[in-house]
Image: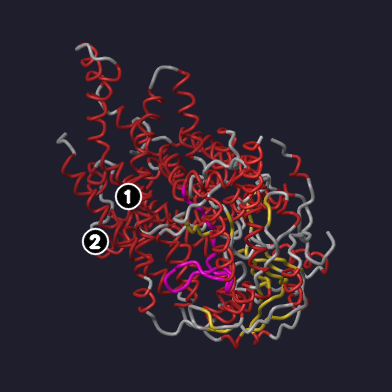
Amino acid sequence: MDFSFLSEPAFSGGGTYFDWVLTGIKWTMLVSLCAWVIAFTVGSVLGILRTTNVIWLRGPATAYVELFRNIPLLVHMFIWYFVMPEMVPKALGTWMKTGMPMPEFWSAVFALGFYTASRVAEQVRSGIQSIPRGQTNAALATGLTMPQVYRHVLLPMGYRIVVPPLTSEFLTIFKNSSVALTIGVLELTAQARTISEYTFRTFEIFTLATVVYVVITLAVVVLMQYVETRIRVPGYIGTGR
Amino acid sequence: MFTGFDFDVIQRSLPYLWQGMQFTLGLTLLAMASGIVLGTLLALMRLSGIKAMSVPAAGYVNLLRSTPAILVIFWFYFLVPIAIKHISGDSYAQGIGPFHSALIAFTMFEAAYYCEIIRAGIQSVPAGQVNAAYALGLNYWQATLQIVLPQAFRNMVPILLTQSIILFQDTSLVYVVGLTDFMGAASKVAQRDGRLVEMYLFAALVYFILCFIGSYFVKRLQQRITPPR
Amino acid sequence: MFRMHKLITAVIAASLFTAPVMAAELTGTLKKIKDTGVMKVGHRDASVPFSYLDDQQKAIGYSVDICMKIVDRVKAELKMPKLKVEFVPVTSQTRIPILMGGNIDVECGSTTNSVERQKQVDFAPTYFVTGTKIIVKKSSGIKGYDDLKGKTVVFTQGTTNERAMKAYNDEKKLGINFLPSKDHAESFLAVQTDRAVAFPMDDILLYGLKAGAKNPDDFVVVGEFLSDDPYAIMLRRDDPQFKKVVDDAVKAVYKSGEINKIYTKWFQSKIPPKGINLNFPMSDGLKEAIKNPNNTGVGPCGKMKC
């Protein structure tokens, strides 16, 4: 293995091939983090709605989860990127394709975010449902309303319990961000592929990309393990599963 | 340019889409079967007391689980044929074909995920069962194959099937190397005829129906086989 | 003595009348084809009229026809009239790794013979001569490359056109925003749907894409040639036996004049799936390449220095 090609000036755009790798990492992180914001917010709302007793809150949330998790991520990407602009009013569609900055980036973020929201919802739901029924009853008995029970009992407990599964959902988003290359986002995997094409150093550059993914994954795992020990609910064995 | 919905384009391309679906189904079923076999071996290695077995297995599983599926597909699609040539020393060795390249990639990738499911399944079997088996004079393989795995698999079937539905969805990623699976076929027609809306929505519908039926079936199965606690 | 004489005559006769390949032991790709009974042909999805899918999703085109001549030659050389032919789809990005990996034996697409690629693969004699131009919407008013300043341009990943366009962009500091795409159909679609204003590609492929569009008159191919692109069939390197069969097959098609028939069929008559006629007469460059078959490659950056 010879990595010296990384310091060579890249074919185009100035900079070296190593700069291309860095750009790739930047886009991978940006797509993942932005998508996570959507996935976490939307997923939390949906997960909470799925635990309520109100059918017209629970029903749509369940439908969303079933619809979104039963369609492959790649199809989500294509629908957000190719189909959406054609379905909305023409002026908006044209803006989405030409006016909006970085349409491929935002399509990827929305596709990945709303897709993962369905998975986050399931984690949040099972976290809340794993809290013994007695806690809710006790809270209600002390005079709390149902929204207050969620605010002061179920959610603080639930989120602490679901930290480990949510960590793995974040790692899934991080890995799945590579699907964004199919609509033209030049994230890490796409950059690796392009560099291999320009330098014929397929083995080296794929190795480097893999190492980057593994290192970032490890970093997240270590960080979240620390977070987990800090916020662990006393009296529970460990994870929420 | 996308005035009106053109259902005709779907009907015209149905035979081609069906070919793609056969590719997808074949790839899913074979990768599932071989992935579960390899995953079981990896799980047994991870659980064995021998460091020389458990450490490489754990390393493999963690490596594959932190790498994106697309990167794994690229690895195997572009490099396995070249690796085979190096190993066999025959620079004109028979290539392994796009289908088989994809199959190997998904087998190796999914095995890591199956491994973790199966490992949990094996660990859920009470230790007394194994001790009893040894006490009866069974050796490791007899105890594993006749006592541990049957019980473990019984608990795991729903999760393994759920993972296989994910695998079915993931096979659409062979699109990145230009193969004609169901999604590949749909996108080739979509691009050639400029009918993106129809083809991609149709693809979404087909995947949804199949996966929804699949997960409904898994849920039913789960209720039936969960032993009363 | 008499017998010896007869033997020598036989040997000479054999070497004269049978193909030289059969005299020696088979090696490389020919051996592989003989052993497996299958020859694998790589094709493209949307390189009209060279190599593309018709309404039944079968690979057809000018390159495919020439490749079938190679297949016929291989059948004759190996005395395997029933040799199976398998078509494998490739893209601009996958064609070289797939060929090197042995998943295809010849690539019958629309591949430019470049010096860069010659480091990895070998090429048969040039069978078409084209060069990079751009396709734009007529309504965009773009007349040449310098009008692309600050605009979005879509390119097919892994093409020589990508490099030529990027080299031009760097040299003229146009600040173009590049959008990568997987294959030509997807790239052209980006122009059709206004995601990109231009798509740099070999001009002949652009005419093919334009002709296949719903409203061909909405599009126009503009610009001077950014690069010269001689097309050739790709095969693996260091495989002299197979290379000779391929070269001979192509040269035979040129010599017999059959090439004119194939050319007319794809460039000057109605072609599937929509029955369009490209009306593209043979260029002087191609006439020259047919008269003097050669496989000279071109540099990596088109007409720019790099």
Q: Is residue A105 visible?
A: no
Which-is-in-front pick, marks 1 and 2? Answer: 1
Residue at left 55%, top 42%?
A: B81
Q: Earlier in the sequence, mark 1 or mark 2?
A: 2
| Residue drawn at x 80%, y 64% as measured from the top left | C170
> In x, y percent, where is residue A166?
43, 45
Q: Considering depth in this image, is B40 or A48 the residue closer to the camera?
A: B40
Q: Nearer the viewer, residue B123 or C164?
A: C164
Quadrant, the C terminus of chain C: bottom right
Residue type highlighted by circle 1: Arg
Q: Is residue C231 left or right of residue B45?
A: right
Chain letter of the residue carrying label 2 = A
Q: Residue at label 2?
A: A54
Q: Residue furthest right?
A: C305
Q: Residue at x 21, y 15 (%)?
A: B132
Which residue matches tag 1?
A: A125
Q: Magenta stretch?
A: C37-61
Packing grade of label 1 (10 A; few <14, some 14-19, many >=20) is: many
Q: Amino acid at mark 2?
A: Val
Please determine whether, in this image, residue B128 is positioned above or below residue A115.
Answer: above
